Amino acid sequence: MAITTEMLLEKMEQELAKAKQAMPAEQLREHIYAVKALCEVLLESGKAEQPLPAGPSVPKTVLKPEPLKMEDGANGDSIFDF
C-alpha cells in the first residue's frame, strides 16, 4: 500500500485535533512531535504529488553464503578444525 500525501495530511489533521484537546503539556508535545514527523516525511520525500513508498522492501530470497574454498582443503570447513 502506498502512502499518499493526502493520507499524511489527514493524519496531521487528526494529530492536530488531538493536540487541541490535550490537557497536560506532555500530551500536547507528543501530538505536536507527531505532526512534525509527518511534515518531515513530506519534505524529505521531495515528491509532494506522488505516493510515498509504504516501507522498506524485504527481499523474497535470502542468499546463502558459500563456504570459503581452500586450495588444498586445509583445516576443513570449520574454523575449529586444526
Image (cartoon, grey):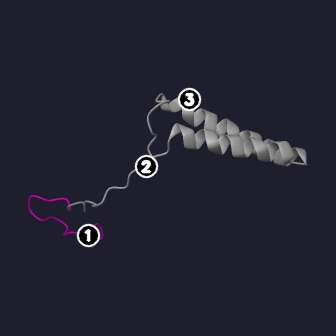
Mark nearer the N terminus (3 vs 1): 3
Mark nearer the N terminus (1 vs 2): 2
Q: Tell me what residue is drawn at x 9 percent, y 58 percent.
A: 71
Q: Which contiguous range is marked in magenta?
A: 67-81
Element marked by disc 1 = loop
Q: Tell me what residue is drawn at x 64 percent, y 45 percent.
A: 11
Q: Place residue 25 in its image quadrant.
A: top right
Residue at which label 3 appears: 43
Instruction: Measuring from the top left, give residue 50's x and y in whole percent.
Output: 44, 34
29 in the magenta segment: no
Asked if residue 35 is positioned above or below residue 18 in the image, the reply reads above
Counting every numbered tag in the picture gives: 3
74 in the magenta segment: yes
In this orientation, which residue lies closer to the viewer: 55 or 78? Answer: 55
User: Which residue type carries mark 1?
Assistant: Ser
Quick one: which residue is furthest to the right in this view? 24
Element marked by disc 2 = loop
Spatial CA distance of label 3 from label 1 is 50 Å
User: Which residue type carries mark 3?
Assistant: Leu
Residue at which label 2 appears: 56
Element marked by disc 3 = helix
Q: Tell me what residue is drawn at x 85 percent, y 47 percent.
A: 21
Residue at which label 1 appears: 78
Instruction: Measuring from the top left, give residue 65's x and y in whole percent.
Output: 24, 60
Q: Relative to residue 2, is residue 75 drawn left or right? A: left
Judged by depth in the image, the label closer to the viewer, 2 or 3, is 3
Asked if residue 3 is positioned above or below residue 67 in the image, the reply reads above
| Quadrant housing the C terminus | bottom left
In this orientation, which residue lies closer to the viewer: 9 or 52? Answer: 9
User: Which residue type carries mark 2?
Assistant: Pro
Judged by depth in the image, the label closer to the viewer, 3 or 1, is 3
Count neighbours of disc 3 (C-alpha within 10 A) and say few if under 14, some if 14 to 19, many if 20 or more.
few
